[in-house]
Amino acid sequence: DVKVTQSSRYLVKRTGEKVFLECVQDMDHENMFWYRQDPGLGLRLIYFSYDVKMKEKGDIPEGYSVSREKKERFSLILESASTNQTSMYLCASSELDRLSNQPQHFGDGTRLSIL
Amino acid sequence: GNSVTQMEGPVTLSEEAFLTINCTYTATGYPSLFWYVQYPGEGLQLLLKATKADDKGSNKGFEATYRKETTSFHLEKGSVQVSDSAVYFCALRGYNTDKLIFGTGTRLQVFP
């Protein structure tokens, strides 16, 4: 089974702090994704990466950056946390194989609170 | 651009009732369609998928048919159980992209 592991289930930080959310997958997937989930808004894509050191902006990249130095690890960085970044953050991974429509596999999420 | 619209919840049902959660989409070309489920405290899991018109995806008693003429992918189950209580997300992947576009999610609550 594919395993996507997010480093923290719950995290509390203060406004202005630099925050790192870590995600590791164990299936050698090329693609990795970061979403935030908010009530009434569903999942919105922040960034995704299709290879080491490659990244693309999603729908809501403002205030975030990402790092992918190794294939299995994809980090989301909040450069200077703000209260409107309080949310549930979900990481996902998938194979780079659009023809077979392989699904994205999700971690259990990190609930981040910015005080 | 591409988008997904699904019915607002919560949907509240008694055990063994029939379930329908509506999902419609807007897309160019021929998208693939998915239903994901999120149980309390967990991430999303793929429930079923359909990759072309008239395909029917099915899993765990749930079904959805890809209807191109009505641009719909409604989720159905004939007899729900308490354990089906979760949030259900309809999603679309456009042609030649790995990105998914999600609906807002529908919470299902099943009571004994």
Image (tube, coloured by chain):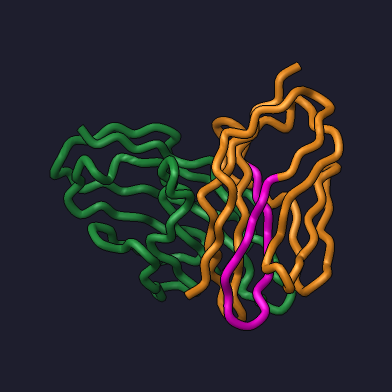
Chain colours: A green, B orange
Residue at image position (76%, 67%) is B67
Residue at image position (20%, 54%) is A79
Residue at image position (78%, 73%) is B53
- Residue extending furthest toward the front: B70
- Residue extending furthest toward the left: A16
Residue B43 in the magenta stretch? The answer is no
Residue at image position (63%, 69%) is A95
Figure disc tally: 0
Whole-percent x, y for residue B26 in the image? 57, 70
Which stretch appears magenta?
B21-37
Residue B28 quadrant: bottom right
Whole-percent x, y for residue A3 in the image? 62, 49
Residue A69 vs B8, above or below: the answer is below
Residue B26 in the magenta stretch? The answer is yes
Residue A23 vs A60, above or below: the answer is above
Whole-percent x, y for residue B108 in the image? 64, 34
Please tell me which residue lies in front, A81 or B60.
B60
Residue B41 vs B30, above or below: the answer is above
Q: Is residue B88 left or right of residue B48?
A: left
Overall secondary structure of the magenta stretch?
A: strand
Q: Is residue A3 left or right of residue B54?
A: left
The C terminus of chain B lies in quadrant: top right
Residue A111 quadrant: top left
Whole-percent x, y for residue A112 in the image? 34, 38
Please tell me which residue lies in front, A84 or B56.
B56
